[in-house]
Image (tube, helix red, strand yellow):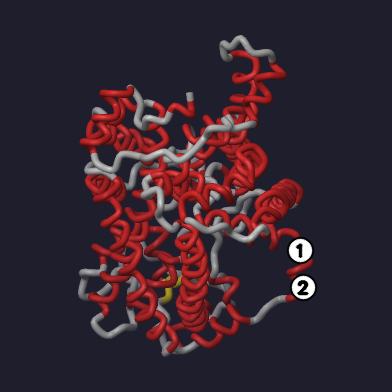
Amino acid sequence: MEVTVGQYLQRGAMEMWKMCPLFKGVGIGNVVISFMCIAYFCVIVAWALFYMIASFNSTFPWETCTNWWNTAACITGKENATSLANITRYLNGNATETSVEQFWEKRVLYQSESISEFGGIQWELLGLMALAWVVVYFALWKGITEARKFVYFCAIFPYFLIIVLLIRGLTLPGAMTGISFYLTPNITKLSETTVWKDAGTQVFYSYGVGFGTLIALGSHNKINHNSYRDAFIMCVINGGTSILAGFAIFSILGYMSFIANKSIAEIVKPGVGLAFLAYPEVASNLPLKQLWAFLFFLMITILGLDSQVCMMEGLFTALEDTFPFLLRKHKKVSLLVTCLFFFILGIPMVSYAGAHWLTLIDAYGASGIALLFVVFFEVVGLAWGFGAQRVRQAIYEMLGFKVTKLWLIFWKYTAPFVTAVLFIFCIVMYTPLKYPNGKDFPMWAEIFGFFLSSCSMLCIPAYAIYYLFCKKSDLTVKEKIHKGIHPPKNLGLSKRPYTVEEEMEFIDKTGDVRNNNDYK
């Protein structure tokens, strides 16, 4: 629905809701969630760049235990039985840590024990984050046409590397243990609501629903573009890619379990750093390891930049639609200011406590209850406000065919019901965030997390109250409600200018980014 309505109305996440203004808070909520995610995504890119640079060494720094950051608990996995026994005896039975784990926690992150222990700035990560933002800026400064070329390359290139790494991972000792762990279902887990909650929220997150990005990208399509086909293909490819990547990851986790003499469950630590623990291990065992390590972390970098560019396009489209004179007429400057602003927001996440802050913002601000709450009202607004039948008619007007009426049931009943149930599960089955060592985050961090969630959630009732009681109008509250949840009867196709020159001409002539009087 997001892509279809965005393409039909040729508007971003906020201005799209002029067709049902009572729900405009949903669009603002989309932007806030996207804002939260954008704030930390270049930090992940900085991590990947750090590893990519480190891969140029003849001996990887995560391969040995002789570096300044290593402790007595460090093992490489290449020790003989006698050496390993001596290390274990020296530690009095305490757990060992692989050299990969210690490189990640003690060298890349300088990770502190607590979210309140900022310690200082990891200056190398700060510089790499700045570089990532420079790339994002130049990917976007010439508009969506040039940005799409960047995104196409970023989306296709990683498949080659995933397949290569999967083949190598399957040849490592212990790989089948990891694959078996991946493929063996635990049927008893299906009775746990937490599993359904996690699976549902992951689907929303992985497909980008609720961030406003799909709406923005759809708004830049030509009006007769087959977005229905694209959405179907995207769903199939996204699911297939997740399964393929799962095989690659768990074959490597099986190997890590083998060399560290730990179970898979002990190897898989909570948090966002799993890829930075699993893949360096397999890269160390590849022929031409420097090449493959470089290419892998280049892939992670590209995927991160790809996601960041798409989210920035979604955010910037929404803002441009709202403030066309300010942003579109001075796009390069306004984009530069926006990128600089997000760079500053990312600085706390390259401190020694940065990974903990990133985990907090990711869990509360950009996913979980906030995302589900906003998506629920988005579905209600589109299926019941704009109208599921109107969405179906929009597809017919743009593409020349009508989709099955089953979609009306999915849009009007199934989607709101599933989203509401998942939201309730998130509330009922709430568990505090934990550090990698298993300890809970402090209470003040949890409270701050709920504040981040409320930033997007409260936009919906707050704007509805503003629309009904504060916005100047001669209409009664009852009339405002009726107008606020019903789109204009003459609402129809509109055309977005596709070049900067066309956009400037529209602004000069009409004072708006699109000449569509149906919204006025």
- Residue 188: mark: 2
Residue type beneath disc 2: Thr
Residue 112 seen anywhere in this rendered image of the structure: no
Q: Within 10 angstroms of label 1, few (less than 14), some, or many (20 or more) residues?
A: few
Residue type beneath disc 1: Glu
Image coordinates for residue 74, horizontal then vertical, percent: 43, 71
Question: Would residue 89 be found to the left or right of residue 381 on screen?
Answer: left
Residues 439 and 17: in front is 17
Question: Would residue 356 be found to the left or right of residue 432 on screen?
Answer: left
- The correct choice, above or below, for 469 with respect to 192 in the image is above
Can you identify the residue that label 1 sits on? 192
Image coordinates for residue 116, horizontal then vertical, percent: 51, 40
Residue located 58% across and 12% down the image: 473
Image coordinates for residue 211, horizontal then vertical, percent: 50, 45
Residue located 68% across and 78% down the image: 185
Residue located 48% across and 33% down the image: 14
